[in-house]
Amino acid sequence: MKISLLGGTGDIAEGLVLRWTKAGHDIYIGSRSEEKATGIADGYNKRLFELGIESDIQGGVNADAAAASEVIVISLPYEYAVSTLEQIKSSLEDQIVISPVVPMSRVGKVFMYTTPAQGSAAQEIKEALPESVRLVSAYHNLPASELKEIDRVLDYDVVLCGDDDGAKEVVKNLTEEMENLRALDAGPLEASMMIEAITPLIVNLNVRYKPQHFSVKFV
Amino acid sequence: MKISLLGGTGDIAEGLVLRWTKAGHDIYIGSRSEEKATGIADGYNKRLFELGIESDIQGGVNADAAAASEVIVISLPYEYAVSTLEQIKSSLEDQIVISPVVPMSRVGKVFMYTTPAQGSAAQEIKEALPESVRLVSAYHNLPASELKEIDRVLDYDVVLCGDDDGAKEVVKNLTEEMENLRALDAGPLEASMMIEAITPLIVNLNVRYKPQHFSVKFV
């Protein structure tokens, strides 16, 4: 599939790019500047060449990346997610958008989930998208460091939710192409807060139980 | 230890009573009526006798159960938790109180976490307790049906939080006496919302993936 990652650096983007390229998908990196996006794409191509994997990852401004894709991953901090989507709204039509976005803040010694007025980041983002775009909330709780070790088996669950069953099926398949990841459907988009809120909990556990990088499994 | 369960029926109470009695703890069942509490206690004693385990579980009104205990488990629905604790406030002093309480409601087809004004059920409950009582938030996400199968190995995590390290250590030990349960400390009491919100997520997954009863493990 044609998949773009808006703001394709850091966090889980690297692992998704490497693994999905290996699985044969076409990846497009979006950024605010074309130069930055091309630089990121070149870095990934170099890394994949070293791994012996053929790749032709493209880079471009967010609007071009989105327009060229069937699936778009919002690989941006919460603070920039809605404004970025609003800027590229004319390039959004019929795509599947994946939100791994989590609003959180540090309060004293602990990271806390900060509930948006709409109920969750995903519900807030939905308001910024055209009606025809299908939003799936997923990939909040994957440990970035394990994800980017491309041959590592990921024995975790990806809990996802959304209002379009077809879109969820696509994301489920993209998820389960990554070895041992299991996708669990938690229902409609309004369930997103309960998935998003696991992330700051994991961050707190990671701080306390260093060097462990926790993810979650429903057993 | 002397442990009471306020409202000792249903949900996770049965499993905790059976397993802690087997481990040698003294259990006291609290209820609004002495007659009801005695009936519940007798039922547990009968069940333990059938399992070949000696027991002398007592029943009494909530205030007496609390006054006789070192550890109190609030085994009550969210709706009754604060009012019950306020009624027995004069019997609360220096105990460790465990809150597995989760505020949730059904919205359409999905169970949703309903955030209390204080941030979480545990923080709301803390306001109803005397200063000397040490509150630990734990046991929200244990599957009741597996817990009450007394010989079943429970390969799950209990994520707990609270502001008193000594109290958390006691609850950690009580947890890990149950075979294979692992207690993970998620920090101060204000982290409780992120633990509590996992419960309605699990309920939704249980509905969708019937007959699975999910619990959670951080891996």
Image (cartoon, coloured by chain):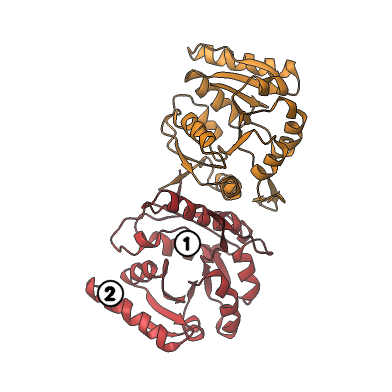
Chain colours: A orange, B red
Q: Position of residue A97 (x, y in %)?
A: 62, 32
Q: Is the residue A5 above or below the residue B19 in the image?
A: above
The disc, 1 or 2, on the residue closer to the chain's N-terminal end is: 2
Q: Is the residue A106 above or below the residue B173 in the image?
A: above
Q: Position of residue A93 (x, y in %)?
A: 66, 28
Q: Secondary structure at mark 2?
A: helix
Q: Disc count in the image?
A: 2
Q: Position of residue A124 (x, y in %)?
A: 70, 44
- For disc 2, the chain is B
**Residues beneath discs 1 and 2 located on the same chain:** yes
Q: Position of residue A71 (x, y in %)?
A: 59, 27
* Horizontal side, residue B48 vs residue A83: left or right: left
Instruction: Name the foreground residue: A193 vs B158.
Output: A193
**Image quadrant in which you'd find residue B129:** bottom right
Amino acid type assigned to the residue bearing label 2 in the image: Arg
Q: Is the residue A77 above or below the residue A116 in the image?
A: above
Q: CA distance from mark 1 to mark 2?
A: 22 Å
- The numbered mark at residue A29 is none
Residue B215 seen from this side:
no
Amino acid type assigned to the residue bearing label 1 in the image: Tyr
Q: Secondary structure at mark 1?
A: loop
* Horizontal side, residue A78 vs residue B79: left or right: right
Residue on which disc 2 sits: B47
Instruction: Name the foreground residue: A50 vs A216.
Output: A216
Extreme residue toward the front, this view: A132
* Residue in the image at 30% along x and 64% along y: B150
- For disc 1, the chain is B
Residue on which disc 1 sits: B139
Instruction: Name the foreground residue: A127 vs B219.
Output: A127
Q: Is the residue A25 above or below the residue A205 in the image?
A: above
